[in-house]
Image: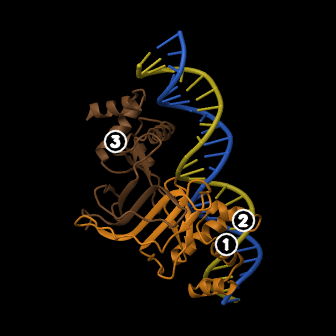
Chain colours: A brown, B orange, C blue, D yellow
Amino acid sequence: MNTGVLDILRNNNLSITDSRKKILEMFQQADGALAHADIEKKSKDKFDRVTIYRTLQTFEQKGIIHTIPTADNAVLYALCKEACTQGHHQDNHLHFICDNCNTTYCLNHIPFSSIKLPKGFTKNRTDIIVSGICNKCN
Amino acid sequence: MNTGVLDILRNNNLSITDSRKKILEMFQQADGALAHADIEKKSKDKFDRVTIYRTLQTFEQKGIIHTIPTADNAVLYALCKEACTQGHHQDNHLHFICDNCNTTYCLNHIPFSSIKLPKGFTKNRTDIIVSGICNKCN
DNA sequence: GTAACTGCAAAATATTTGCATCCTT
DNA sequence: AAGGATGCAAATATTTTGCAGTTAC
C-alpha cells in the first residue's frame, strides 16, 4: 500500500513529504470519508492544523480527493476513483452517511438513473447523499 | 403572501415576531435557497447575527426549512414543501446549484429512480445536488 | 541551490453561549 | 404577568494568511 501512496503523489507532481504520505494513507485505510477533525485526531501531535488544511486543499485541486456534501454541514473528504482528474472530478458520487455511527460509505457501484434537468440547465457534477442506518448499526 | 407567513408561524406554535416574519418572507420571495450571509445582507441593520442563527435553527427544527448539502461547504437553507413535518423532513430533495451565479434551485418535480441500497442499509433521507450552469447563465 | 512545504503566530470568519431587556400572548 | 425572543458581549471554533525556517529534489 505504501507504494500506492508514493505513486499517487508522483503522478500528480507532488513532492513526497511526511504529511502527504501519512494523510493519504489514512484515506486509504479509512476506505471512506474523513473530516478535517478526524485527520487531526488520528495524527495527534504529528502535523499542524494548517498543514492539514493545505494538504487537503492540494489533494482536492489535484483530483486525489473530493469533498462530500453533507446536510449537517460537516466537511468530508474521500479518495477519488480513477475517473477523477485534476480539476475535473468524477461525475457521479453516491455516498451513504450513517445517522448512528456517522461512518460515510462510498457506494459508487449503486446504479441510479441519470437526472434530466430542465431546458437550459447544464450538468457538471452530481452528488447523491443518502443518510440512514448502515449495515453495522442495523 | 403575508398571511401565509403568519399561518406558518401559527401552525408551528411559534410566536409572531419581526425577525421570523421577515426571514420567512425572504425565503418565500427567494423561491430558492438562502445562506446565513444572504439573510444578513438582505436585512441590513435589521437583525442581529445571533437572531438569524437562532431563527434558522428554530425553523429547521420545526420543519419549516431544511438544509441543503453543498460540496463547497456553504450552509444553505430552503423552505420545505408540505410533506415536511417537525423532525421529519421530506424524503427527496433535488437541488441545482449554478456554478456561475451561485443561485440554488429546488427542482422537486424532477423525477429520479429511487436508489436501492445494499442489504442491511436503511434509508432515511436522500439529497441530490446537481451543480452546473443554470438557464439564466447559459 | 532553489523551489516548495511546514510550523508557528496571528488575523479573519463563523458559530455558540450567557444574560439582561423587551416583546408576544 | 409570564414565558419566550432579541440584542449585546464574549467565549469558542473554524479557516485563512504571512513569514521564517526546513526539506525535497
Q: Estimate how packed mark 2 is, as few (under 14), some (14 to 19) or many (20 or more) residues with alpha carbons within 10 Å.
A: few
Please give the chain letter of the residue carrying mark 2.
B
Pointer 3 residue: A26
Q: Position of residue A7 (x, y in %)?
A: 32, 31
Residue B27 appears in which quarter of the rendering? Answer: bottom right
State the quadrant of the C terminus of chain B. Answer: bottom right
Q: Amino acid at mark 3?
A: Met
**SS at circle 3:** helix
Q: CA distance from mark 2 to mark 1?
A: 8 Å
Q: Estimate how packed mark 3 is, as few (under 14), some (14 to 19) or many (20 or more) residues with alpha carbons within 10 Å.
A: some
Residue drawn at x 40%, y 34% is A20
Pointer 1 residue: B26
Residue drawn at x 44%, y 48% is A37
Pointer 2 residue: B42
State the quadrant of the N terminus of chain B. Answer: bottom right
**SS at circle 1:** helix
